[in-house]
Image (tube, coloured by chain):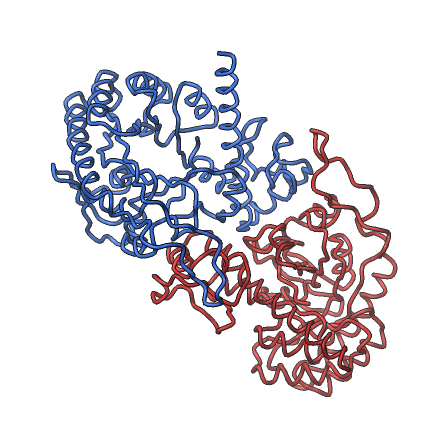
Chain colours: A red, B blue
């Protein structure tokens, strides 16, 4: 499955009912961003992220590790964790394996991620090994903390509550069962296939219900990304969820899914949409181009999304060129539909293979 | 009826299907803005504004006069028309009564407006009279041009066209019948009740299917606005549409509708929404305030819009405070629903009076 990114508990510009209509089954939200705004205590008191954002389908939160590394030049990494400053106001903060677990338990996503160090690219051999070892020690600490505190999720404490003074219930956002969250481990090891193998085997030894491949899309060539994904994948158990983090184009998504990756997320469809870059069955369309100014055809004639069924390229081009809010909304809806349809095609391909097999 | 403002052929952030669901029956679009972007030729070639924006309900375009006066410090008014420079790129343009008709016929809205001079406030007696006389001469020129060219609307030239290469028709945007547009006159006369009366009577003498009260909300006190509206209204025929331009708060809208105004438009619900100011049955709510950060209640417990039925004040406050696109989308949907519901209440009040009557 493909997970659209809803950084701050919202997929930019798209309301939850449209996400449901698009067939989104699971969203990714960013712990780092929610930790800073609105803060974990607010989300916890609101009953967790599902109820806070009125989203009854699944949510995965990342650990915050990637943002701490990518958004903070002045971070300080120790064995204990990472000290960093908010990219918003410079205020000092600290995340450790235990703190990242505490925060993610408070947010209450269905799937939460171990706190890892994302090794920079390029990195020399010693640095790669040290970083991988640190991530492994942190993974064990995450699991320990999670096992002790997993009962503290803000679910199931209350029944569906009457929220409206007029006495009518709000659209159902049921509180969850007594089930706990699932904590996934993350494989690191930089661009070294040997380290990746070791990281995978030792993370599996710690034992998680799912495993992510992290530390990719950090500036390396796409060929290298692919090699590392494939060489890591073979060391991860096929009866556990395998999640490739932060990758990639529609073609890559389909390729990795066919290779056995179960879950992927990427900001590309939503971010590109906001910059007028649209994915279609005929290739990429940069809707800002003047050539579309009087083009009455649908953005993608083969697409059945609500944007392609209703609007012309000329109108979408006008909205984008005029900096209209609706451009970002409609472009995002289309790109998400394109990604999700790609994944549905892969699932059909897999089922056909199973049936033939 | 209340007409939401879709300046550039889009109500900012709200897709057309949501506008339909909200019960919007007629939109206002701005000739001045569409004239500059995407240009009338593009809209005309796309079959007119309805088809360009995929909106099968009614549209009214203003004449461009108000924007020429409010957005252009360096305009030059002559008997012939107004020379001005684009607020976008400084390029020189010219609008006259004839040109404003030509542009509005090309855009193809259902209702189009005479090109008028919006008298500044305050203005002395001579300036008020001169400006009113100019608007009257321009109104006659508009009518003349319109009568000669009204057959040139970009409607009805073709049947519903197969737009999609896959052979499936896009959601129906039927081309219109052979009917022509309706041209409304505009009453000016500044803040002088005597001039307003004269402007009304002489505009009615020219003869239009509907009359607008223009030149208000230009900086005058609200009490004065109300006095001028009421004193003008009595000189307009009750069997023709009476349209009050660019006014006002939900209370004013309801008050004017009960007094006999048939049509109103205002940017307030949409613009205020984008600034986090929301109208509710319990008064105005500034959703940015920290007091709502952990408020689980609906924005307006008495409201049945899709925003109030699904989201909490806490979530809306978070979206706004985090500068999320969805804040503008959801806030706009709620405010429009509030305005439209207010108008529905007035219509029920009028029908009850007729029934009692």
- x, y percentage for residue B333? 53, 41
Give the left or right position of residue A132, taking residue B15 as reference.
Answer: right
**Is residue B45 shown above or below B339?**
below
- x, y percentage for residue B127? 16, 26
Picture residue at 53% right of the left edge, 65% below the top: A303
Image quarter of residue B271: top left
- Quarter of the image with the N terminus of chain A is bottom right
Of residues A327 and A334, the one nearer the viewer is A334
Of residues A142 and B292, the one nearer the viewer is B292
Give the left or right position of residue A192, taking residue B327 as reference.
Answer: right
**Is residue A58 shown above or below B8?**
below
Please say whether residue A185 is visible from this viewpoint: yes
Residue that extends furthest to the left in the rendered view of this protein: B79
Picture residue at 72% right of the left edge, 55% below the top: A57
Picture residue at 82% right of the left edge, 67% below the top: A141
Image quarter of residue B284: top right
* Count of numbered tags: 0
Of residues B114 and B217, the one nearer the viewer is B114
Image quarter of residue A259: bottom right
Give the left or right position of residue B6, taking residue B80 as reference.
Answer: right
Picture residue at 11% right of the left edge, 36% below the top: B79
Residue that extends furthest to the top in the rendered view of this protein: B357
- x, y percentage for residue A291? 34, 67
- Quarter of the image with the C terminus of chain A is bottom right
**Is residue A78 shown above or below B133?**
below
- x, y percentage for residue B153? 28, 47
Please say whether residue A276 is visible from this viewpoint: no
Give the left or right position of residue B248, taking residue B189 as reference.
Answer: right
């Amino acid at each position: 499955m493909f997970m659209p990114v809803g950084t701050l508990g919202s997929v930019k510009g798209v309301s939850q009912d449209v996400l449901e209509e698009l067939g989104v089954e699971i969203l990714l939200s960013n712990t780092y961003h929610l930790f800073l705004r609105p803060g974990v205590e607010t989300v916890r008191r609101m009953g967790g992220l599902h109820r806070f954002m009125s989203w009854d389908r699944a949510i995965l939160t990342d650990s915050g590790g990637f943002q701490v590394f990518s958004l903070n030049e002045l971070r300080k990494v120790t064995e204990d964790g990472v000290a960093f400053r908010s990219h918003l106001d410079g205020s000092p903060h600290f995340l450790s394996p235990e703190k990242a677990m505490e925060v993610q338990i408070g947010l209450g996503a269905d799937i939460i991620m171990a706190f890892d160090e994302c090794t920079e690219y390029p990195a020399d051999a010693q640095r790669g090994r040290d970083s991988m070892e640190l991530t492994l020690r942190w993974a064990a600490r995450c699991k320990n903390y999670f096992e002790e505190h997993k009962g503290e999720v803000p679910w199931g404490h209350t029944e569906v509550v009457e929220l409206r003074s007029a006495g009518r219930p709000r659209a159902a956002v049921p509180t969850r069962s007594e089930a706990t969250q699932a904590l996934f481990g993350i494989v690191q090891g930089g661009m070294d296939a040997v380290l990746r193998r070791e990281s995978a085997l030792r993370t599996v030894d710690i034992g998680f219900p799912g495993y992510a491949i992290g530390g990719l899309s950090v500036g390396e060539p796409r060929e290298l990304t692919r090699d590392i994904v494939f060489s890591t994948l073979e060391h991860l158990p096929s009866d556990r969820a395998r999640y490739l983090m932060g990758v990639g184009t529609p073609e890559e998504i389909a390729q990795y899914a066919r290779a056995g990756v179960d879950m992927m997320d990427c900001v590309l469809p939503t971010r590109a949409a906001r910059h007028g870059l649209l994915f279609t069955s005929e290739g990429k369309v940069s809707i800002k181009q003047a050539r579309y100014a009087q083009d009455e055809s649908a953005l993608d004639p083969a697409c059945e999304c609500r944007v392609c069924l209703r609007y012309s390229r000329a109108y979408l081009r006008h909205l984008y060129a005029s900096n209209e809010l609706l451009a970002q909304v409609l472009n995002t809806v289309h790109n998400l539909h394109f990604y999700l349809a790609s994944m549905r095609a892969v699932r059909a391909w897999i089922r056909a293979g199973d049936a033939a097999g």
